[in-house]
Amino acid sequence: MSKIMRKLLLILTIFFCYSQLFSQCDGRYETEIFTNVNKTTVNYSDVFIDLEHEMDIYMPEGDTETNRPVIIYMHGGSFYLGDKSMTDCVDFCESFAKRGYVCASINYRLSNIFSFLLSQDVQLETVLKAVSDANAAVRFFRKDVVENGNTYGVDPETIFAGGYSAGSVIAIHQGFVSDISELPQNIQNLTVSIGGTIEGNSGNDGYSSEISGIISLAGGIHDPSWINSHETPIVSVQGTNDNTIDYYCAPALNNPAVVNLCGAGEIHPQADLVGLHNDKLIFNGEGHGWAASGNSNQLFLDALDFYSNFLYPLLPCNNISNTETHNSTKKRKLIKVVDVLGREVKNNHSKILFYIYDNGVVEKKLNNEIIW
């Protein structure tokens, strides 16, 4: 893309991207209000151009909103099987697109089954690579807002991540581990394979990968102590008889050769202990497979409504005065400052300027005061 075209897109983004930032939800996002959805398949990495880095983006057909929350959804399959077109992925994304969200079902790097089951280092490294990919998927949307004029009509400050089974494990670690210093040394050593940081090596560098919430369908975390009060809100649904990811803590896949994962029975008490916003729906006596068949299982439909009810109050259109919704402003980084013609400037003396941040936010300021 030429420099002139980039500048024109930037100018359009500046004036239109946030025109509806704090409008009321107007009945959106709670229930399915759209009849049909459109699906677009793209590659979300600017480093890996392959099937493992494709995503299907679901959007409500005929929708004119240009500031929609995003959900990144990840399939299950024990980190060696599965793809973005699995039944639960399609049904989840279609349901939330019909509610007004933009929902992206992504592929991510998988492991060889034999290598995975024989080595805990391979298991941990596989999860790190998947988290790297998920982070790049988040950054894809923020990069698109700034560089391409917001092709998908999203709110770059409101991006959630979730998934089923292994996909949920990715989202949980994506939300609760923001720096490798939080990890034990043996896991830190494995990050060499993804560039030495938790942000990973999957591309779209320079933009934030922070998420606004975690959606867990039968997921777990390697160590509940990684959850603290400054982390991401989480909502979980899980069965108490889950033998794939234990409701409490046990080797994953019910296999002593696989690393421990701790489910909702450990995650949510820890979240309560540290004062983190969270909620859970527990299916007593249910196993792991309730989500796999998607809409054909009433438990899956119940879970969709539960997730929707949890996310709704977190949306900016419902939460204008809630500082927790905007905590990301404390972590964002300024990319550059431009004038009304998209020209980069170095001072702010008596000018209307546009401040562009790594989380996709564009602020209009006069004399350093926001004037939107």
Image (tube, grey):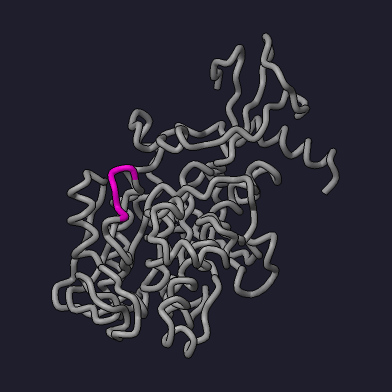
Image x and y of residue 7, in percent: 78, 36
Q: Nearer the viewer, residue 101 or 324?
A: 324
Q: Quadrant of residue 199?
A: bottom right
On screen, residue 2 versus residue 340, left or right, reads right
Taking 210 as reference, is 37 above or below it? below
On screen, residue 360 versus residue 48, left or right, reads left
Image x and y of residue 202, in percent: 61, 61
Image x and y of residue 335, in percent: 64, 35
Who's the residue at 48% across and 59% down the image? 72
Taking 191 as reference, is 62 above or below it? above
Q: Nearer the viewer, residue 72 or 328?
A: 328
Q: Which residues are magenta?
A: 226-230
Q: Residue furthest left?
A: 284
Who's the residue at 42% across and 86% down the image? 117
On screen, residue 167 versus residue 277, left or right, reads right
Q: Is residue 33 visible?
A: no
Q: Quadrant of residue 239?
A: bottom left
Q: Quadrant of the C terminus?
A: top right
Image x and y of residue 246, in percent: 24, 75
Who's the residue at 50% across and 46% down the image? 68
Q: Main structural element of the magenta stretch: helix, strand or loop?
A: loop
User: How many numbered callouts?
Assistant: 0
Q: Quadrant of residue 334?
A: top right
Taking 117 as reference, is 124 above or below it? above
